[in-house]
Amino acid sequence: MTASSSAEAIPAMQETMMEFRAGKMIFDGKKVVPDLRKGLVRIGRGEEGLLHFQWLDRNLNAVEDDQIIFPEEAVFEKVNQVSGRVYILKFNTDDRKFFFWMQEPKAEEDSQLCSSVNYYINLALEFLDEEEPDADAPLQVSEGMLEDNVSSRAGNLVVPNPGAEAISDVTSSSGPVKLEDLQRILSNIDARGSSSDPDEGLGLGDILKPDLIMPLIETLPLEEGLLSHLPEVYDSLMFGISSMFYVGA
């Protein structure tokens, strides 16, 4: 809570946190009157790491008053007993009081300026490097964090494919496919219905391989046996299967 007057050396500011236009008021007996000069209030950190509350003459760009403030030592508030835009910097540890009158053009911003002053003068010394938090600032997510999160979530989205299991059971056996096996494969495909993604899973070309199906077609009444398991577009499907066998052969 050391105070420096204009007669003492003013330390250079290492960082300016905020500043706004305000004139100061001076004591005249038992009352305070406005100093009509254009002024500036500046809050910043000195080279020694302490927080300074300064008042400057804007025309001369010279610091006239410099107060060092520690957290919870002072409060900046509006003087409600007067009709003007008068504010007071009041210390809790002694009887020091400093009055200021706002010179910013927009009076509606006075309340926000007052809140910002109190934020900085009560900020712990170890946090002076940080800026005032912005509630509207979006959360920043690095590209690496996003990729890790997506990979982790995708790893938990493994869904078993019953049709693929049935196909694996059939194709892993030796010899030609049996009629009942083929019926079971087509039943599994039909059960998945139109709700499945047509781009997912295996196609008929992966299931009905010519070297396994051709012996079955040649020796069994295939068309009659599979009729109950085929979709309504029977003719188109049979044409597609025949074409596939022809190309595969």
Image (cartoon, helix red, strand yellow):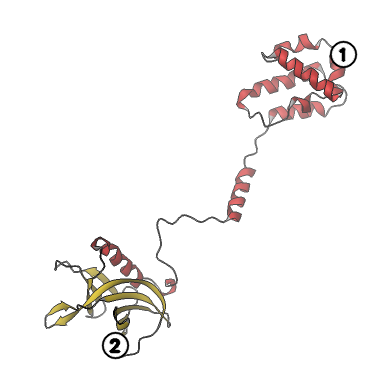
In the image: residue 227, left or right of residue 10: right
Residue 98 vs 222, above or below: the answer is below
Tag 2 or tag 1, which sits nearer the N-term?
A: 2
* Label annotation for residue 218: 1
Under mark 2, the amino acid is Ser
Quadrant into which the C terminus falls:
top right
Under mark 1, the amino acid is Glu
Residue 191 vs 12, above or below: the answer is above
Mark 1 is surrounded, within 10 Å at the Cα level, by few (under 14), some (14 to 19) or many (20 or more) other residues, namely few
Looking at the rendering, which quadrant does residue 119 occupy?
Answer: bottom left
Residue 127 vs 217, above or below: the answer is below
Where residue 59 sits: x, y (%)?
29, 80
Where residue 110 sits: x, y (%)?
26, 64
Q: Are marks 1 and 2 in contact (CB under 8 Å)?
A: no
* Residue situated furthest front in the rendering: 59
Task: Tell me the residue that label 2 is attached to.
Answer: 6
Callout 1: SS = helix
Can residue 73 be spotted in the picture? no
